[in-house]
Image (spheres, rainbow, N blue to C red):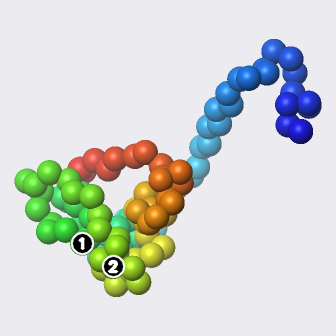
Amino acid sequence: MLGATEPKWIENGTYMTGRASTFDAGAWDRRSLGEQEHVVGRFKVSGQPLDSPDDPNAPITDPNFGADPTGTITPTNSHIRKANPRGPGDEQRRIFRRGYRW
């Protein structure tokens, strides 16, 4: 049991973890625009999901993964699908994040 090994002062407490990661920006910059967008799952300028029109003046829409279950439009291994899945029962696995326009 986890609680049995914890100090008394942490009982009923919460943990927070931070992680620092390195990123090779040069390698990323050498990728084509299309590659970058498919890795992320969003258009770079507008921030729209790949299954929406690439309109920088429109409000950001939610992706419709149900209409693209095999990842033809938004690859199944893209960041947006991994960080914010939309299938039944995925609500507990979602990371609350919102993209921003560069």
**How far across and how far down the image is residue 69, in percent?**
39, 79
Please state if 57 lies on the left or on the right of 79 as rendered: left
**How far across and how far down the image is residue 12, in percent?**
74, 23
Residue ranking furthest to the top:
9
Q: Residue at x 51, y 60 (%)?
A: 89
Residue 26 visible in rendering = no
Please state if 61 lies on the left or on the right of 72 as rendered: left
Which circle's residue, 2 or 1, is located before the other in the chain?
1
Q: Residue at x 45, y 75 (%)?
A: 76
Kind of element beneath mark 2: loop
Give the residue type at disc 1: Asp
Q: Residue at x 27, y 58 (%)?
A: 62
Where 70 sits versus 78, above or below? below
Where 31 sits versus 1, above or below? below
Q: Find the distance from the CA under tag 2 to the CA under tag 1.
A: 8 Å
Residue 68, disc: 2
Labels 2 and 1 touching (C-beta < 8 A): yes
Give the residue type at disc 2: Asp
**Quadrant location, the N terminus:** top right
Residue 66 visible in rendering = yes
**How far across and how far down the image is residue 3, in percent?**
85, 31
Q: Residue at x 21, y 57 (%)?
A: 61
Q: Of 88 and 35, which appears nearest the observer?
A: 88
How many other residues sit within 10 Å of disc 1, few (<14), some (14-19) or many (≥20)? some
How many other residues sit within 10 Å of disc 2, few (<14), some (14-19) or many (≥20)? some
**Residue indicated by mark 1:** 51
Q: Of 99 and 8, which appears nearest the observer?
A: 8
Residue ranking furthest to the left:
57
Where 71 sits versus 78, above or below? below
Question: Foreground mark, 2 or 1?
Answer: 2
**How far across and how far down the image is residue 63, in percent?**
29, 64
